[in-house]
């Protein structure tokens, strides 16, 4: 989607290795989010950020950490990847009070072998 | 946060009107209702948002009864390209923290 990019788009990694996914926005939105999507579970919120250096946990935050040192970048880190973290990860952005909801990125497909 | 309940799947035929209902019994006073559409291998896309009564845009209508405990997304004259998963979300726009349910998988047949 315009204004939000995720990298990498695909990644295969080994169990126990650290992995960092990047979300970059050019919309200057205050809120940024990381979701994971697995078959049968819809989208589940991992972490979100409501400003630079301000982050909070979502419903499935165990095994994940995030950082936001600049408005435009939100990083998701798997400190030690496990097979259960094989998933599609989506980043989203939003601005409080506006009536158009989230804008999502195109997703990162992560496979942990 | 208000929990939402939607049908898991629905079938329709091209040219028909499709109505997908979402239940949100514990919706709060400041909560808005938002619907998203998701195609395979893509992120969800915003469709429509409302607070009460009826909202209409170029792709859909959203009907919200007076008690706001449910809402109905109406897609007029669906085509094969409307085959997707549709999510209903409820939340306060000023807090911007929303949880997705499992969504409704709409299958449009020729």
Image (spheres, rainbow, N blue to C red):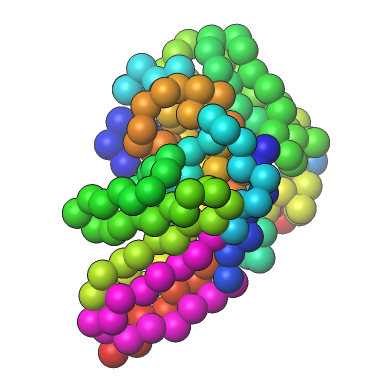
- At 58% from the left and 64% from the top, the residue drawn is B6
**Is residue A7 in view from this perspective?**
no
Dominant secondary-structure state across the stretch colored magenta: strand
- At 55% from the left and 43% from the top, the residue drawn is B90
Rendering coords of residue B24 (x, y %): 61, 52
Relative to B25, say whether B104 is above or below. below
Residue B18: within the magenta?
A: yes
Relative to A3, say whether B110 is above or below. below
Residue B93 vs residue B99, the one in the foreground: B93
Of the 4 image quadrants, the one containing the C terminus of chain B is bottom left
Q: Please identify the quarter of the rendering in which residue A33 is found.
A: top right
Residue B75: within the magenta?
A: no
Residue A20 vs residue B32, the one in the foreground: B32
Relative to B8, say whether B27 is above or below. above
Left or right, residue A16 beside residue A45? right
Rendering coords of residue B46 (x, y %): 37, 47
Q: Which residues are magenta?
A: B8-22
Of the 4 image quadrants, the one containing the N terminus of chain B is top right
Residue B96 vs residue A62, the one in the foreground: B96
Rendering coords of residue B2 (x, y %): 65, 43
């Amino acid at each position: 989607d315009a204004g939000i990019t995720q990298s990498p788009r695909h990644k295969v990694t080994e169990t126990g290795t650290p992995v960092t996914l990047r979300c970059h926005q050019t919309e200057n939105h205050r809120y940024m989010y990381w979701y994971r999507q697995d078959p049968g579970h819809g989208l589940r919120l991992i972490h979100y950020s409501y400003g630079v250096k301000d982050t909070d946990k979502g419903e499935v935050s165990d095994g994940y950490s995030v950082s936001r040192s600049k408005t435009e970048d939100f990083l998701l880190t798997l400190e030690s990847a496990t097979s259960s973290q094989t998933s599609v990860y989506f980043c989203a952005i939003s601005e409080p009070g506006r009536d158009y909801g989230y804008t999502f990125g195109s997703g990162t497909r992560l496979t942990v072998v | 946060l208000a929990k939402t309940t939607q049908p898991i799947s629905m079938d329709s035929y091209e040219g028909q009107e499709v109505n997908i209902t979402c239940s949100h019994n514990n919706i709060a006073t400041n909560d808005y209702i938002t619907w998203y559409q998701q195609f395979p291998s893509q992120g969800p896309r915003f469709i429509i948002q409302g607070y009460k009564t009826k909202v209409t845009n170029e792709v859909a209508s959203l009907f919200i009864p007076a008690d706001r405990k449910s809402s109905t997304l109406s897609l007029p004259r669906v085509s094969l390209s409307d085959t997707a998963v549709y999510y209903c979300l409820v939340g306060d726009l000023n807090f911007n923290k929303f949880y997705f349910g499992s969504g409704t998988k709409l299958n449009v047949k020729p």
